Image (tube, helix red, strand yellow):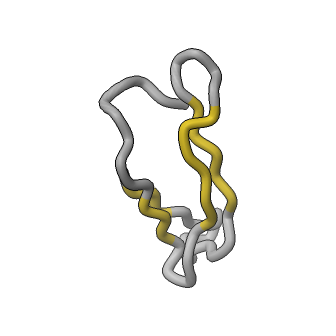
Amino acid sequence: MAILKKDPGGDVLAGAAFTLFDSAGKEAASGKTNAQGQLALQDLAPGVYR
């Protein structure tokens, strides 16, 4: 799974923190965007996340 975060002006946002929760509400993954505004989350099982 990959996330690309931009600010309201359309510029990439480095250092944005994300926490991904599974359908039971348990933390499945977390991380911060890199200098290009990207965060890649590896090894996630298929499912519904929020």
In this picture, is 9 found above or below 23?
A: below
Horizontal placement of 24 versus 47: left or right?
right
Q: Position of residue 34 (x, y in %)?
A: 55, 77
Q: Measured along the vertical axis of the image, is residue 14 above or below residue 22?
A: below
Query: Of residues 19 and 10, which is closer to you in this image?
Result: 19
Furthest residue to the bottom?
A: 35
Q: Is residue 23 above or below residue 27?
A: above
- Residue 20, percent from left and from top: 57, 40
Q: Residue at x 61, y 59 (%)?
A: 31
Q: Is residue 32 left or right of residue 43?
A: right
- Residue 27 image offset from top left, x and y in percent: 63, 35
The residue depicted at 64 percent of the width and 52 percent of the height is 18
Most foreground residue, 10 or 48? 48
Image quadrant occupied by the C terminus: top right
| Image location (x, y in percent) of residue 43 | 35, 48
Seen from the viewer's position, the closer of residues 2 and 10 is 2
- Seen as rendered, the residue at the extreme left is 46
Q: Is residue 27 left or right of residue 5?
A: right
The quarter of the picture where residue 2 lies is bottom left
Residue at the image position 64 percent from the left and 21 percent from the top: 25
